[in-house]
Image (tube, rainbow, N blue to C red):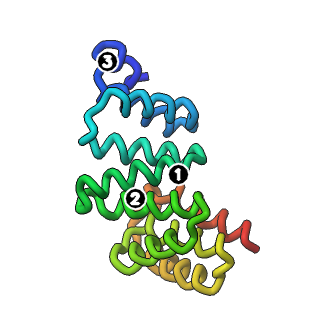
Amino acid sequence: RDAERAYDLTPSVGNQMRVASALLAAGKTAQAIRTFDACLERASANDLDLRIEAAKAKIEGDQAEQAITLLRDVRRQNDAYRVQEVTLLSARALANAGQDSAAGQQFEYLYKNFGAIEVKVEYAIWLLSRKKTAQANEVKTEIDQAVKHWPRHAKYLNKPLLKKLKQAFSAAK
């Protein structure tokens, strides 16, 4: 509501992007994609944040090829910009597009170079989806060990991510 009010008062690309992000967070993926597409038509070709956020929506909306195009554009313009996030989104988009070899390369690069929990969770889920259960279990063990040492607020903040991991392992059984 706040994003929509801000856009109604000042219909800028930034405020329209806030609306799109709010729609995506609310699970209204199709609306979010349409809104991001409208932003892309109005915005500068140099707005990398917009391209990244639009790619997220397109991944959620099963438009992997379009997400890949947006993310490649981000890398072409600035290959050092939000590297972990862009690479993780690229890996997910490539996996969704059935480009397993390329997705695997991206996930392995992330796993070796970044220690973020999101990277490890997404990598473990991808490994499970490719029937690489032993490797997925190794990554999950690493995650479980890290979680044991987290303070309560870190566990709370990462609860949705850990739930996603748990669901993936339950489904793989």
Question: Label 1 amino acid?
Answer: Glu
Find disc 3 in the rendering and name its residue.
11
Residue lying at 44% horizontally and 68% vertically, measured from the top left: 119
Residue 18 is left or right of residue 10, and the answer is right
> Label 1, label 2: how many angstroms apart (C-alpha)?
36 Å
First reached walking from the N terminus: tag 2 or tag 3: 3
Q: Mark 2–mark 3 contact, CB under 8 Å?
A: no
First reached walking from the N terminus: tag 3 or tag 1: 3
Find disc 1 in the rendering and name its residue.
65
Residue reaching furthest top? 9
Point out the frontmost of discs 2 and 3.
3
x, y (%) of residue 157?
Answer: 43, 55
Residue 14 is left or right of residue 172, and the answer is left
Query: Circle 2 sits in a helix, a strand or a loop, which is it?
Result: helix
Residue 95 is left or right of residue 155, and the answer is right
Residue reaching furthest right? 173
Q: Which mark is residue 31?
A: none
First reached walking from the N terminus: tag 1 or tag 2: 1
